[in-house]
Image (tube, helix red, strand yellow):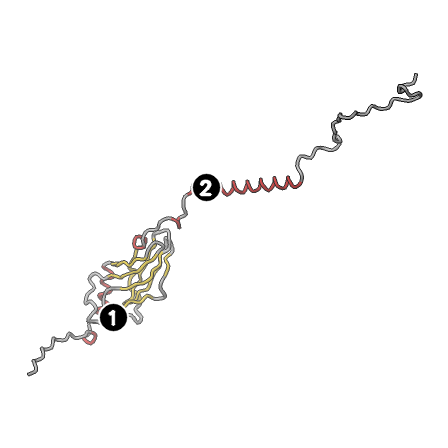
Amino acid sequence: MSAESERPGEPGGFLGPVEPGEGTWTQFRRNADQPPRLLSLRQKSLVVGLLLALALALTVRHALDRSAAAGPAPSELALPFPSQATRFEYGGPLPSWQDSFALSLTVHNTSAGPVDVLAVSQGYRGLSVAVAGWLPQTVPPGQTVSLRVGLRVTDCSAAPADAGMPFLDVTLRNTRAIETQSEILGDSYARDLSAALHATCDSPDNRTPTTSPTAPDKPVR
């Protein structure tokens, strides 16, 4: 008997492979040689971009947290007033040149920010003050600057015969305020200035004579 079965009702016929009937289905099977694709190229690029953005955000946040924990920078701290941040020192007399007297004035800045010296003056009406170089001059944080201050006698009658406690008015500025303060430079400065005033004004020709009051006018008849 042949291995192929005859189809009933058909002489000499054979029974072929059974095909699925109507209403039935077969599961589609992928080729076993091709692995399944999880993400497309576009999806992979999107995921990589998101991961990079997340890493950048975490890095920035970490840097901000460390900066906040470290505290504000010195420049952001509230600086003291200029009068509290500076110290003045008389450095002795200098060659007078065309001035009646010249001195070295050293400015010490003890704060964490710069201080500008805007002006130097004094209260005697018969003396004028000039600073060599230029103003303002900046004193860096924690450093010193030496200024040459020249004084010239403009009127001996208005200048003091003896400078008992002379002072200089110095105008200072920093990021907090502008202040003018009077600086008393000590006994050495007083002695040197008094000696210079005597040398300049002891001559009778250099002092303006005091005028006696005039007699009142007689009434006109």
Q: Position of residue 151 (x, y in %)?
A: 28, 67
Q: Position of residue 39 (x, y in %)?
A: 66, 37
Q: How many marks?
A: 2
Among numbered discs 1 and 2, the one appearing first in the sequence: 2
Q: Residue furthest top?
A: 1
Q: Nearer the viewer, residue 78 or 205?
A: 78
Q: Position of residue 160 (x, y in %)?
A: 20, 67
Disc number for residue 66 = 2
- Indicate whether 105 appears above or below 29: below
Q: Residue furthest front?
A: 9
Residue displayed at 74% across by 31% down: 30
Residue displayed at 23% across by 62% down: 166
Q: In the rendered image, which quarter contains the C terminus? A: bottom left
Residue displayed at 84% across by 24% down: 17
Secondary structure of residue under mark 1: strand
Q: Residue furthest left?
A: 221
Mark 1 is surrounded, within 10 Å at the Cα level, by few (under 14), some (14 to 19) or many (20 or more) other residues, namely many
Q: Nearer the viewer, residue 180 or 44?
A: 44
Disc number for residue 153 = 1
Residue displayed at 21% across by 64% down: 163
Secondary structure of residue under mark 2: helix
